[in-house]
Image: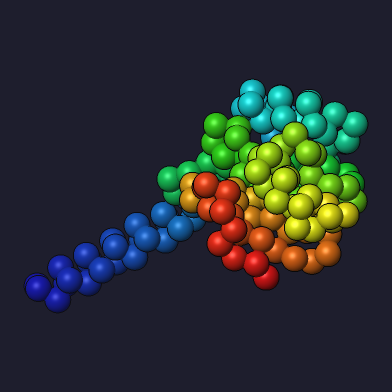
Amino acid sequence: MKKFIKKAIMAIVCLVAFQTQAMADTDRPITVNQLPATAQQVIRSHFSGMKVALAKMETGFLEKSYDVIFTTGEKIEFDRDGNWTEIECKRTAVPAKLIPAQIANYVNTNYPGNSILKIEKDRSEYGINLSNGVEITFNKEFMVIDID
């Protein structure tokens, strides 16, 4: 009887784990109008001349995010509140108004003539990729903490 109970519990645990995995990481296409207002404002203000190829909502087990991909290849990722978390540009530079002034000043001073093609931010740091291939990481106080 104990073996049966152990097997039944193991089966239930496996079933729950499989269901949890199946529920996580679901992507769903949406319209730009279904994005949070903050994300819509970023697109209107800084990417107004670009056509959206795909907007999607990604839901994970405990999180939600949004991706917008333009027909030119540019991509923006937003958190659940519509704040950008990553901007990747293929043909142009990241819009200057979206780059913190301290980062822009550092790049202009130390890497003149280069543009920022990608910027990422999370709770503790910013990361940028320059047009010359250099990758720079800043902490939240905008001090350089890594260069590749």
Establish if 20 lies above or below 134: above
Identity of the residue furthest to the left in this view: 1
Q: Residue furthest bottom?
A: 3
Residue visible at 58% across and 49% down in the picture: 142
Q: Closest to the observer: 62 or 46? A: 46
The N terminus sits in image quarter: bottom left
Name the residue at 64% across, 26% down.
Answer: 38
x and y percentages locating residue 24 in the rendered image: 49, 52
In the depicted structure, whether residue 85 falls above or below residue 30: below
Taking 70 as reference, is 136 above or below it?
below
The number of numbered discs placed on residues in the rendered structure image is: 0
State left or right for residue 104 relative to residue 8.
right
Is any atom of residue 26 visible in this view?
Answer: no
Q: Residue 13: which quarter of the image? A: bottom left
- Whole-percent x and y of residue 65? 58, 42
Tell me residue 40's x, y (percent).
71, 27
User: Residue 68: where, in percent of width, then height?
Assistant: 73, 41
Q: Quadrant of the C terminus?
A: bottom right
Q: Is residue 46 visible?
A: yes
Q: Which color scheme does this rendered protein use?
A: rainbow
Instruction: From the viewer's side, name the closer residue of 78 and 94.
Output: 94
Foreground residue among 43 and 33:
43
Residue at left 69%, top 55%?
A: 128
- Residue at 15% x, 68% y is 5
Question: Residue 114: which quarter of the image?
Answer: bottom right
